[in-house]
Amino acid sequence: MIELAFSILAADFAHLADEIGRATAGGGTIVHVDVMDGHFVPNITFGPPVVKAIRPVTSLPLDCHLMIENPDEFIPAFAEAGADMVSVQVEACRHLNRTLQLIRDHGMLPGVVINPATPVEMLSEVLSMVHHVLVMSVNPGFGGQKFLPRSVERIAHLRRLRHELGLNYRIEVDGGIAHDTVASVVEAGADMLVAGSAIFQPGKTEENARDFLRVARAAS
Ligand code: DX5
Ligand code: ZN
């Protein structure tokens, strides 16, 4: 099933509840929360208190993408705040197997995220443990960057591996996904589509979400 995971990084932070409502009205079904610590990535965003604040304003799953060092230290706080899915960057985890298990032990769905310069093979030992693999199609840290076209082949590779290994993880893609790039990633096998700047726009959010999903579903 093709889903839009709208990234609130591009929303108006002073009106987050309304912004989530608009993206949901346009068909978005996952709230993507970009957590940045100023160390793993050169930007700072938000953490568990914001997750806790938005938890009561939506019934959609909260998908927390941790772009942080030492994610293990914060997993309990995200669980307590009401996160449903937590994904960690393979590049930030010294004991990835343990971290993914920790996420599951806290009742959340674990995901692993892979940066553009990291070989897909780095994930081979954990693919059976994850609910989803998140393919970064930009270098993480900022919204509004340009889609890196090699991501298409990386998504297709993960789809082939899923088939060969008899697994059922979902494939999420994040960065530069917009009306002109979404078809290529859907055709390659992505079905959780993160988009921020292509969705949130004053007065156009609901319409943007609807158009985005129309293009994505037509490609599937
Ligand atoms: C980038 C974040 C993305 C970002 C996507 O580090 O992980 O989720 O918000 O933004 P757009 O859709 O504008 O590329
Ligand atoms: Zn993200």
Image (cartoon, grey):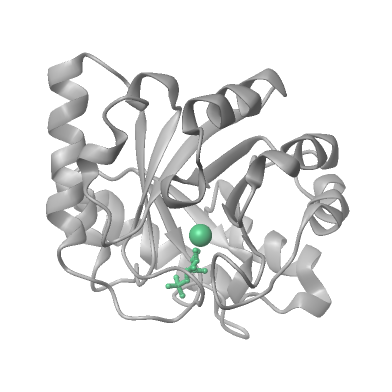
Residue reaching furthest to the bottom: 202
Instruction: Examine the image and state in which quarter residue 3 appears.
Output: top left
Instruction: Examine the image and state in which quarter residue 160 appears.
Output: top left
Which x, y percent locates residue 131?
45, 28
Residue 220: tell me if it is visible: no
Give me the residue at 44% from left, 58% from top: 194
Q: Nearer the viewer, residue 106 or 11?
A: 106
Q: Is residue 69 above or below residue 109?
A: below
Q: How many marks?
A: 0
Which x, y percent locates residue 13?
76, 76
Which x, y percent locates residue 111?
48, 36
Q: Is residue 21 above or below residue 63?
A: below
Give me the residue at 39% from left, 67% from top: 175
Which x, y percent locates residue 59?
73, 40
Residue reaching furthest to the front: 94
Where, quadrant-wise, is the N terminus in this rendering?
Answer: top left
Give me the residue at 60% from left, 37% from top: 85
Where, quadrant-wise, is the C terminus in this rendering?
Answer: top left
Q: Nearer the viewer, residue 44 or 49?
A: 44
Give me the residue at 58% from left, 22% from top: 101
In the image, is 96 to the left or to the right of 215?
A: right
Residue 7: tell me if it is visible: yes
In the image, is 169 to the left or to the right of 103?
A: left
In the image, is 90 to the left or to the right of 123?
A: right
